Amino acid sequence: MNEHVSLSVPADEPPARQNERTNSRKVFIKTYGCQMNVYDSGRMTDALAGDGYVATEEMGEADLILLNTCHIREKASDKVYSALGRLRDMKKARAAEGKELMIGVTGCVAQAEGEEILRRAPAVDVVIGPQTYHRLPEALKRARAGNRVVDTEYAVEDKFEHLPVTEKAKIRARGVTAFLTVQEGCDKFCTFCVVPYTRGSEVSRPVQQILDEARRLVDAGVREITLLGQNVNAWRSEGEKGEWSLGDLLYRLAEIPGLARLRYTTSHPRDMDDKLIEAHRDLRALMPYLHLPVQSGSDRILKAMNRRHTAAEYLRLVERIRTVRPDIAMSGDFIVGFPGETDQDFEDTLRIVEDVHYAQAFSFKYSTRPGTPGADLSDQVPEDVKAERLERLQALLLKQQADFAKSCVGKVIDLLLEKPGRMPGQVIGRSPWLQSVNVDAKTSQIGDIVKVRIIGTGPNSLFAEPAESLIGP
Ligand code: SAH
Ligand code: SF4
Ligand code: F3S
């Protein structure tokens, strides 16, 4: 999971139909944070559909603006308050025209700060946590009647049971790849992290609910599903024969006809069980890409972070996975400058990166988060030291990323065609290793898996030419 995903939910209907329904209200959702927030934004749109809301990509034409927020680092939270400042002016201008503009804050900042948001940002009408967004329509009704609402309880009911299923047309508009949240919350309590406080304890969605949702996605044309969870591989539920772990679920999902590709994120090294590793060996649909954050290569720091494994254990795990799936691309998250991190500890992090060879990675300066145990530690690392370490680490990770991309040149791969490219006649697809690949193809082929030969690399994507015949859909 990373903080770089920041996209608004695409309009759910083609413009022609939106114009026909001039009476409908429009919602604009700005999504910050991880993929789980992206999924939640989609489901919030579903929740609001019953009240006549359609999603818009134009903030200026929205009657309701939701900021679906992230609390993971200080910068992420700060963004929310600066955005709310701008929205206050917009709301005033709208009121002067006698028009309504409602503003809501959802997601992890909502959960963490609750009432405080209403106090600091008078323009906000509703504050709703990640566990209660199925109650959005009700909260908006109360706010319209003059009562600003904060709803950050951990709901006793299962929100998924209360959300309307996503309409087929909406799934289609969202594309041929989809996220499916299977697990929420975290019980790991890494000492730097707010997630256990903002998302609560680990909860797994039941098998049947997941299978139903997956089938609905596939019926609407989805070819690739990414299972999501703050600790997705901690997912456990009652299956057909006793308790299932994520590996069992993947075997079952791989049987769904038409579902070509499966991925899952984010995993904790402690929860990579044998079944999940076997799934990487056996399932053709399970893509050879694994995001397995290690955070640090120093045992001392790993202990202080409460990661509950050593660097050597992590390396052994990567080796086991590579033994069963040699072409797997590894991805990771790193934090530099955790309190007490010495030059030697940092060198250990560089060493583990050298040992693993990451195809992709996200790295961050440690950010002190209120309420986490890390915030109370006295030996905080100075900003300039953090900045220098981050620069060195990122240079190494970028080099590995470029090396991996170069190693793909000349290979013939299966490419899932996803969306139109920037140039006419071009389509962007995903490689098995999650790279964006540009290729000449027709937009009518979107959703197909085609054989292409990688012929070059760009800064953030690869270039390919068609090779041989089509396979799929
Ligand atoms: N559940 C996932 C991570 C969720 S948060 C896991 O356990 O790996 C995504 C990433 O943000 C983390 O992996 C970590 O690298 C980073 N992160 C979390 N808290 C942070 C903090 N206080 N400062 C800097 N980076 C942080
Ligand atoms: Fe945060 Fe650690 Fe839980 Fe990941 S495992 S969400 S880093 S507490
Ligand atoms: Fe951010 Fe919450 Fe995701 S804190 S990373 S949006 S779980």
Image (cartoon, grey):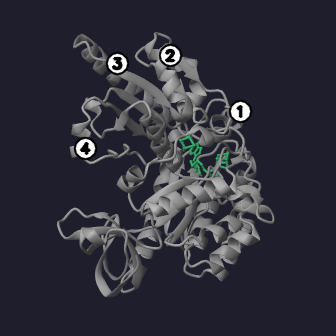
**Which element type, helix, strand or loop, lies under badge 3?**
helix
Q: Amino acid at mark 4?
A: Arg
**Residue 169 placement, left or right of 255:** left
Q: Residue at position x 51%, y 60% from top? A: 361
Q: Which quadrant contains ligand 3?
A: top right
Q: Residue at position x 72%, y 73% from top? A: 316
**Which element type, helix, strand or loop, lies under badge 4?**
helix
The 10 Å Cα crowd at callout 1, few under 14, some 14 to 19, many 20 or more, is few
The alpha-carbon separation of the residues under discs 1 and 3 comes to 33 Å
Residue receiving disc 3: 88
**Which element type, helix, strand or loop, lies under badge 1?**
loop
Q: Amino acid at mark 1?
A: Val
Residue receiving disc 2: 142
Residue 327 image offset from top left, x and y in percent: 54, 80
The alpha-carbon separation of the residues under discs 1 and 2 comes to 21 Å
Kindly indicate whether the residue at mark 4 contacts the one at mark 3 (C-beta within 8 angstroms): no
Q: Amino acid at mark 2?
A: Arg
Q: Amino acid at mark 3?
A: Arg
Disc nearer the start of the sequence (1/4): 4
Frontmost of labels 1 and 3 is 1
